Amino acid sequence: MLLSVEDLHVHFPLGRGQVVRAVDGVSFGIGRGETLGLVGESGCGKSTTGRAILRLVPATRGRVMFDGRDVFALGTGELRALRRRMQIVFQDPFASLSPRLSVGQIVSEPLEIHGVGGAPRERDEKVAALLDSVGLPREASRRFPHEFSGGQRQRIGIARALALDPDLILLDEPVSALDISVRAQVVNLLQDLQERRGIAYLFVGHDLSLIRHVAHRVAVMYLGRIVEIAPAHALYADPRHPYTRSLLLAVPVPDPARRRERAPLEGDPPSPIDIPSGCRFRTRCPHAQEICAREDPPLVPVLGADGQVRPEHLSACHFANSLPVWNNATNPEGPQPAVPSR
Ligand SMILES: Nc1ncnc2c1ncn2[C@@H]1O[C@H](COP(=O)(O)OP(=O)(O)OP(=O)(O)O)[C@@H](O)[C@H]1O
Ligand SMILES: [Mg+2]
């Protein structure tokens, strides 16, 4: 694993004994060149997870290993070196680029900060090559962010993130702020860059149909925890957490013939200041039983239809192995074989 996150907690004290448990025991890994999608409703802790990994917010507890190094134990110098290898691209390409700097300055800034890229001539060449790799003309380097469209600005942000040749990029809703028409182009660019450079992505998003398209594995987050994690095909074909199912049912289906009765998630999630006992999803769960209020279900491998453990597919639900067969219009494979209960 390139990155491994173990039992990460990020709590924000609010005073008067109140604590926001934004990230509350999250564990996952990302391999080299792999994309892990991280999905969940607004406020479930996706950005905070990413920011804690990069040490942009302090973790309360837990461990992050990056290429064999303990990220939280690094000194200032080592952290600087590490920052070259882990980059971040934000959602809003308008707010995240400094308006007073030219595109050339924006893209070359990381090279300057880290004292790499050589003499000015060489650096200009490097910037031109970076712009080229994200599909922008080299003349763009003399212009300013406001002269570009949203999609182009996001390309500038990506070029900047690529400047130091990172191993991992945290993509925090990188296309959510863009017009639908340019989303696919930016997503394709990201996939191209991954293939050519072997970069790993932590791809944070709301849009499950987009994540399905880009991620090798998907982690579903609810109220500060990962409640299900699996290879993308398994998660969409055979989701084993009621929350994942609710999210999938909320995905709009374009073909009216395949539209079925929707069972969207009711209401808002509980506050991360006051997390329910036992299973944190139980207050909105259609399958909740008495045990769910008492026992916090661990994230453990599910059983396949053949009764064998599927080590790559984990769910934190007491009833992960006895949920009704998943047969949703979003699942083009149709009904899956019945799954025996534990
Ligand atoms: N600095 C902070 N102080 C207090 N609470 C915070 C702070 N940062 C985040 N939070 C809270 O932590 C929770 C998780 O926030 P976070 O931004 O990680 O969610 P998210 O999943 O990225 O949401 P979105 O999809 O809206 O971007 C939220 O309840 C948020 O209000
Ligand atoms: Mg966020």
Image (cartoon, rainbow, N blue to C red):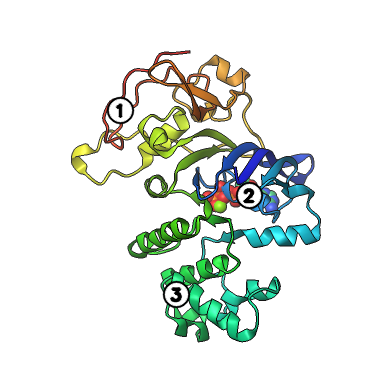
Mark 2: amino acid: Thr
**First of labels 3, 2 by sequence position:** 2
* Residue 103 seen: no
State the quadrant of the N terminus.
Answer: top right
Q: Which residue is mark 1?
A: 327
Residue 119 percent location from the top left of the image? 65, 83
Q: Which residue is mark 3?
A: 132
Q: Are marks 1 and 2 in contact (CB under 8 Å)?
A: no
Q: What's the CA distance linking mark 3 and mark 1?
A: 45 Å
The answer to which quarter of the image holds residue 188 is bottom left
The residue drawn where x is 75% and y is 48% is 72
Q: Which residue is mark 2?
A: 48
Mark 3: amino acid: Asp
Secondary structure at badge 3 equals helix
Of residue 44 and residue 142, the one placed in the foreground of this image is: 142
Mark 1: amino acid: Asn
Q: Is mark 2 within 8 Å of ligand 1?
A: yes
In front: label 3 or label 1: 3
From this viewpoint, which residue is outermost toward the left? Answer: 257
Task: Give the class, few, some or many, for how many residues have Cα within 10 Å of label 1's Cα (few <14, many ≥20).
Answer: some
